[in-house]
């Protein structure tokens, strides 16, 4: 790999897949020199670059740990989700955009009186716990996150074609939330439990499912608890994430279903692409337990 060597995970079998189609994107990254993660394989390469890195054993173990520790609702999900392949996305322009967004959100939050990592319900003022995905992450991954902009790891479940489109060209906010998401309006939806994200990941052509583990700069979070159901079980939209952000008081929306559906599953909606960085793509298999599950979802 020449000068572009990894400073961490160096002993692992890391494969770099270059995509020359991404090297002609508009914009000049030299205007705002980004600081790339020190564990990236291609952080020292000439910019712009877009690389898909197949992760080694240590990194797979870390992400598998998050996958296992964020599985709940055992009667409705696979007994286990096992990673077959883990890909890390190293995109200079996408990361540069994300870094600038993190800096802006951090500056805005440091001007407020509340601690940087607080998620407060606007109506009652009660505090919300941080995303389970971040709390359950191994220390090495958790230490990557920046409290000052409320950065978190979150799951995004989708089909294989859409997942590949996201890691190649980012989230398409014109389509995000138009198929499955209803309650929080248009935007990219994320889960803090792997089992909830898994519900949106159909079986791929190779017999594997796909999930994205995304870094999200949540900033000031609007918490929505007023879920109601229409006839047929459909969720009535209670708030528009896009409009909430447009008003300037909040940067993302947290939908807390606990009060409406007696479940701890929470979902997040982000309507600004620059607040998201799809860092990992997981290809995994469902290992269902026939003793506890009535069927095998997605098959």
Image (cartoon, rainbow, N blue to C red):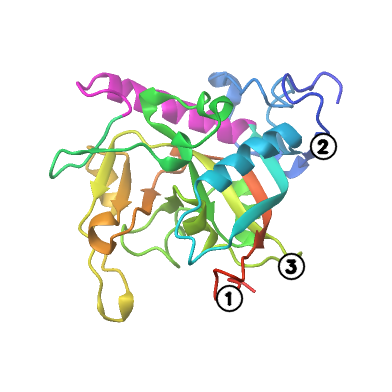
Magenta highlight: main SS: helix
Marks 3 and 1: CB-CB under 8 Å?
Answer: no
Q: Residue 158: give x, y in percent of width and height.
A: 56, 59
Q: Which mark lies nearer to you, 3 or 1?
A: 1
In terms of secondary structure, where does tag 2 sit?
Answer: strand
User: Splitting the image into 4 quarters, where does residue 292 fall?
Assistant: bottom right
**Distance from the alpha carbon under mark 1 to that under mark 2:** 37 Å
In terms of secondary structure, where does tag 3 sit?
Answer: loop
For marks 1 and 2 on the same chain, the one whose residue lies earlier in the sequence? 2
The mark total stands at 3
Q: Measured along the vertical axis of the image, is residue 283 above or below residue 95?
A: below
User: Splitting the image into 4 quarters, where does residue 40 fall?
Assistant: top right
Q: Which residue is mark 2?
A: 15
Q: Badge 1 local density, few (<14 within 10 Å), some, or many (20+)? A: some
Q: Residue at x 78, y 39 (%)?
A: 18
Q: Which residue is mark 3?
A: 205
Q: Which residue is mark 1?
A: 295
Q: Residue 230: give x, y in percent of width and height.
A: 25, 75
In terms of secondary structure, where does tag 1 sit?
Answer: loop
Answer left or right for 222 relative to 8: left
Q: Badge 3 local density, few (<14 within 10 Å), some, or many (20+)? A: few
The answer to whether residue 104 shows anywhere in this view is no
Which region shows up in magenta? 92-117
Check residue 184 for magenta coloring. no
Quadrant of the frame with the C terminus: bottom right
Q: Residue 127: give x, y in percent of width and height.
A: 23, 36
**Distance from the alpha carbon under mark 2 to that under mark 3:** 22 Å
Q: Residue at x 65, y 67 (%)?
A: 203
Quadrant of the frame with the N terminus: top right
């Amino acid at each position: 790999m020449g000068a572009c060597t990894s400073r961490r995970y160096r002993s692992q079998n890391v494969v770099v897949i270059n995509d020359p189609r991404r090297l002609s994107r508009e914009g000049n990254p030299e205007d705002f020199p980004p600081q790339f993660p020190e564990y990236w394989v291609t952080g020292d390469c000439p910019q712009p670059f877009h690389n898909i890195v197949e992760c080694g054993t240590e990194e797979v173990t870390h992400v598998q740990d998050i996958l296992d520790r964020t599985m709940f609702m055992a009667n409705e999900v696979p007994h286990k989700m096992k990673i077959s392949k883990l890909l890390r996305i190293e995109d200079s322009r996408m990361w540069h955009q994300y870094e600038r967004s993190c800096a802006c959100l951090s500056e805005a939050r440091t001007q407020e009186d509340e601690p940087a990592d607080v998620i407060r319900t606007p109506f009652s003022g009660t505090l919300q716990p941080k995303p389970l995905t971040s709390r359950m992450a191994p220390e090495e991954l958790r230490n990557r996150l920046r409290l000052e902009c409320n950065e978190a790891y979150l799951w995004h479940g989708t089909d294989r074609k859409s997942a590949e489109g996201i890691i190649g060209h980012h989230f398409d906010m014109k389509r995000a939330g138009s198929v499955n998401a209803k309650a929080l309006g248009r935007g990219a939806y994320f889960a803090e439990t792997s089992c909830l994200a898994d519900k949106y990941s159909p079986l791929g052509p190779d017999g594997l499912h796909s999930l994205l583990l995304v870094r999200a700069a949540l900033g000031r979070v609007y918490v929505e608890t007023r879920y109601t159901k229409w006839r047929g079980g459909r969720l009535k939209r209670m708030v528009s994430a896009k409009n909430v952000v447009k008003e300037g008081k909040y940067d993302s929306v947290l939908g807390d279903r606990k009060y409406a559906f007696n479940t701890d599953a929470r979902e997040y909606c982000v309507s600004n692409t620059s607040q998201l960085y799809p860092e990992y793509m997981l290809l995994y298999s469902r290992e269902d337990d026939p003793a506890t599950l009535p069927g095998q979802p997605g098959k």
